[in-house]
């Protein structure tokens, strides 16, 4: 059974990082980007919140390369407070936050509205705080089916509406809708991305993981990567520097297995939620 993320119950437990070396026979049999993707299966449990995942292996020079770029939009990224647990979210509209769908459910599969969103949260306090008043999830999303199968992986996203226009203080992060072939160009050779989440520091401090690479991309609007996310990172943005600004190419979702590797971090591609996020703005 695969475990999905946040912090305590089944809804918040996320991704183990990926083993980077494929078996020789698998590596030799796969080449073009448009090949049929590796099958994926429900994965295991994830590292707990508050613990670093040692398997994140950033591309060489990733940290230095990040320093040469404009600052990350950390003011717009924050904690989705669920009461007994938490997820990560990003401001994508004046009062709209993007996160993972499983963060809006309790352990019994019932809708559980997040209490509030803490934007730019860190050791020095919170830049902006707002109450969550509404949540939109894909109509076909079902928590149990999501946890036990890979049938609806691409539906693990949610749009939260806040009671305050905090976007004027935090800024809003744009969304880049990429297809499978475009995502696979983030292979570490010429492109990589940055994953951001609050799980590693137990919701108190944001963790920035540079030099992340796409290992596989699937036709259901998901992709696998090597960022090394942990519980509490669910819904956190995968950011790429595109056309002079940071944009969301995906959000953190769960851990899955493939024929080549166990414990692969899975993200939902922005292609799954870009149109709906624009509609809610």
Image: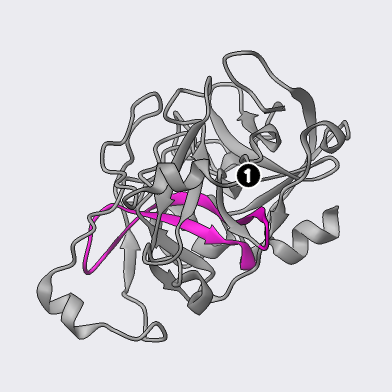
**Badge 1: how crowded within 10 Å, few (<14), some, or many (20+)?**
few
Q: Is residue 3 left or right of residue 271?
A: left
How far across and down, in percent of the image, does residue 183 sit?
50, 70
Is residue 43 positioned above or below 97 on the image? below
Residue drawn at point x = 83 percent, y = 38 percent: 167
> In the rendered image, is residue 176 in sight?
yes
Residue drawn at point x = 65 percent, y = 35 percent: 112
How far across and down, in percent of the image, does residue 203 sit?
52, 24
Q: Between 116 and 21, which is closer to the camera in this rendering?
A: 21
Picture colour scheme: one colour
Q: Secondary structure at mark 1?
A: loop
Residue drawn at point x = 62 percent, y = 62 percent: 270
Residue beneath disc 1: 70
> In the rendered image, is residue 4 in sight?
no
Residue furthest to the top in view is 124
Magenta stretch: dominant secondary structure:
strand
Image: magenta residue range: 243-271
Which quadrant of the view contains residue 64?
top left
Is residue 24 positioned above or below 61 on the image? below
Q: Is residue 60 left or right of residue 103?
A: left
Residue furthest to the front in view is 68
């Amino acid at each position: 059974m695969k475990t999905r993320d946040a912090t305590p119950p089944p809804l918040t437990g996320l991704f183990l990082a990926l083993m980077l070396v494929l078996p020789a026979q698998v590596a030799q049999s796969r080449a073009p980007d448009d090949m049929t993707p590796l099958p994926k299966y429900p994965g295991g449990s994830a590292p707990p919140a508050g613990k670093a995942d040692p398997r994140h292996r950033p591309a060489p020079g990733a940290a230095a390369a990040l320093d040469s770029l404009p600052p990350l939009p950390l003011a717009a990224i924050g904690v989705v407070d669920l009461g007994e647990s938490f997820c990560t979210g990003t401001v994508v509209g004046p009062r709209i936050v993007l996160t993972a769908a499983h963060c809006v459910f309790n352990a019994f599969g019932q809708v559980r509205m997040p209490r509030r969103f803490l934007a730019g949260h860190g050791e020095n306090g919170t830049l902006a705080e707002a109450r969550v008043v509404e949540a939109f999830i894909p109509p076909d999303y079902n928590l149990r089916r999501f946890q036990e199968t890979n049938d609806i992986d691409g539906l693990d996203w949610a749009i939260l509406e806040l009671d305050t226009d905090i976007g004027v203080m935090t800024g809003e992060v744009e969304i880049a809708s990429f297809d499978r072939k475009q995502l696979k160009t983030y292979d570490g050779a010429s492109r990589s991305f940055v994953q951001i989440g609050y799980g590693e520091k137990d919701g108190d401090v944001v963790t920035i993981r540079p030099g992340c690479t796409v290992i596989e991309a699937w036709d259901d609007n998901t992709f696998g990567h090597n960022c090394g996310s942990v519980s509490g990172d669910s819904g956190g943005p995968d950011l790429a520097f595109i056309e002079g600004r940071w944009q969301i190419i995906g959000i953190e979702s769960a851990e899955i297995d493939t024929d080549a590797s166990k414990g692969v971090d899975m993200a939902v591609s922005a292609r799954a939620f870009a149109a709906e996020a624009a509609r809610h703005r």
